[in-house]
Amino acid sequence: MGLSSFFKRVKKDAKNEEIVECHIDINTDDCDGCEKCGIACPNNVFMMVDNVSKVRDSQVCKNCKICMAICPNDCITVN
């Protein structure tokens, strides 16, 4: 048994990788621009445009739903 047997490379099969796309809905009528979702999001998904929260890039979202939990107006829905 050589030293190289301890360092086996793991090849990721592209066919078996699961891509989970999440969909983020923001009710802009209820959003008051508090920026809590943007501050709490660990993936920097949100940005503020005209004092309303908008989705910067939904593909970066990891579906943790922290934004839903922290929104005081319940205007964010992550599916």
Image: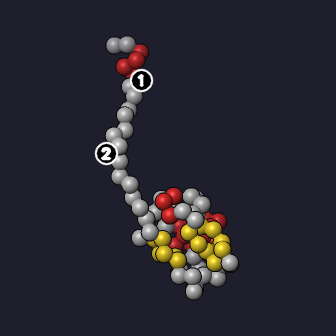
The percent position of residue 49, horizontal first and vertical second, equals 66, 74
What kind of residue is marked 1?
Phe
State the CA–CA distance, disc 1 to disc 2. 24 Å
Q: Which of marks 1 and 2 is nearer the N terminus?
A: 1
The percent position of residue 15, horizontal first and vertical second, equals 31, 45
Mark 1: which secondary structure? loop
The percent position of residue 16, horizontal first and vertical second, equals 31, 46
Which residue corresponds to the image point at 49% horizontal and 67% vertical from the top-left? Answer: 65
Q: Report whether residue 32 is seen.
A: yes
Q: Residue 7 carries which label?
A: 1
Residue ranking furthest to the bottom: 29
**Res 37 → quadrant:** bottom right
What residue did someone put label 2 on? Answer: 15
How crowded pointer 1 is (Cα within 10 Å; few <14, some 14-19, many 20+) is rated as few
The percent position of residue 20, horizontal first and vertical second, equals 39, 58
Which residue corresponds to the image point at 64% horizontal and 65% vertical from the top-left? Answer: 39
Q: Report whether residue 64 is seen.
A: no
Which residue corresponds to the image point at 48% horizontal and 71% vertical from the top-left? Answer: 24
Q: In which quarter of the image is the C terminus?
A: bottom left
Q: Residue 38 carries which label?
A: none
Which residue corresponds to the image point at 54% horizontal and 62% vertical from the top-left? Answer: 57
What kind of residue is marked 2?
Lys
How crowded pointer 2 is (Cα within 10 Å; few <14, some 14-19, many 20+) is rated as few
